[in-house]
Image: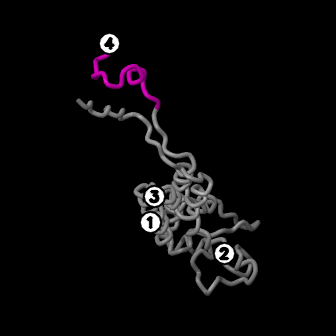
Amino acid sequence: MESSPPVSDRHAPVEVDLKNRHLAALLAWLWPGAGHIYQRRVGKGILFMACIVSTYFFGLALGEGRVVYASYDAGHKRYPFLCQIGVGIPSLGAVAQAVAKKQWHAPLFGLSWMYPPDTISEEKADELSSWQEELHAFFEMGTLYTMIAGLLNMLVIYDAWAGPAFPEPTLRQKESPDAPEQAVPV
């Protein structure tokens, strides 16, 4: 007579092949969710990709492409970009536009998306102030959405590198995982 297979512990960690963790983390930074897809955790990767990329592009659209730009000149430092760069490739256009501004003093391909504003000068009005006046709260909301997308992707990168986290089993689970639940006196 054959015995039935043992019932698996529902709290036991699942083995996940992380493959090359450093490559997975790099892929997760380059495109949100790509590291998980590389590790064959496809559902999780697609979920992260859909949520983070859509949040990022929604914020970029709210700010009409002006809320993501790289500027570290003495007159204007764009600290939110330190969070926005966490999204990877979608934010690298801002780096390319910053280089284009410094080298050629004109946007790449004539596109104004992600092009840094002109700094304050005596002969020219402050372009950043005019953007904020024109877009009202959408400028701040777009900045916030793109920053949140970048920060969330930092967690995704860590998950691709370290793998899933599992809770430590409680003392009762360690002693007898198959025992029925009993009330513990307080």
Q: Earlier in the sequence, mark 3 or mark 1?
A: 3
Q: Is residue 34 above or below residue 112?
A: above
* Disc 3 versus disc 1: nearer the observer: 3
Identify the residue at horizontal 74%, vertical 68% (top origin).
Answer: 73
Identify residue type, mark 4. Answer: Pro
Q: Considering the numbered disc 4 on the image, is that residue within a helix, a strand or a loop? A: loop
Identify the residue at horizontal 28%, vertical 17% (top origin).
Answer: 183
Q: Earlier in the sequence, mark 3 or mark 2?
A: 3
Over which residues does the magenta segment extend? Answer: 168-186
Q: Nearer the viewer, residue 112 or 182?
A: 182
Q: Considering the numbered disc 2 on the image, is that residue within a helix, a strand or a loop? A: helix
User: Which residue in the structure is indicated by mark 4?
Assistant: 185
Question: Pointers 3 and 1 in contact (CB under 8 A)?
Answer: no
Q: Please state, as top left, top right, bottom left or bottom right, where the C terminus lies in the image.
A: top left
Question: Pointers 3 and 2 in contact (CB under 8 A)?
Answer: no
View extreme (front): residue: 1
Q: Residues within 10 Å of mark 1 (few under 14, many from 20)?
A: some
* Disc 3 versus disc 2: nearer the observer: 3
User: Which residue in the structure is indicated by mark 3?
Assistant: 45
What sort of colour scheme is used for the picture?
one colour
Residue 90 position in % (x across, y down): 55, 69
Q: Nearer the viewer, residue 17 or 54?
A: 17
Distance from disc 3 to disc 2, alpha carbons, whole Å, reads: 27 Å
Identify the residue at horizontal 39%, vertical 34% (top origin).
Answer: 11
User: Which residue in the structure is indicated by mark 1?
Assistant: 54
Distance from disc 2 to disc 1, alpha carbons, whole Å, reads: 22 Å
Identify the residue at horizontal 66%, vertical 68% (top origin).
Answer: 70
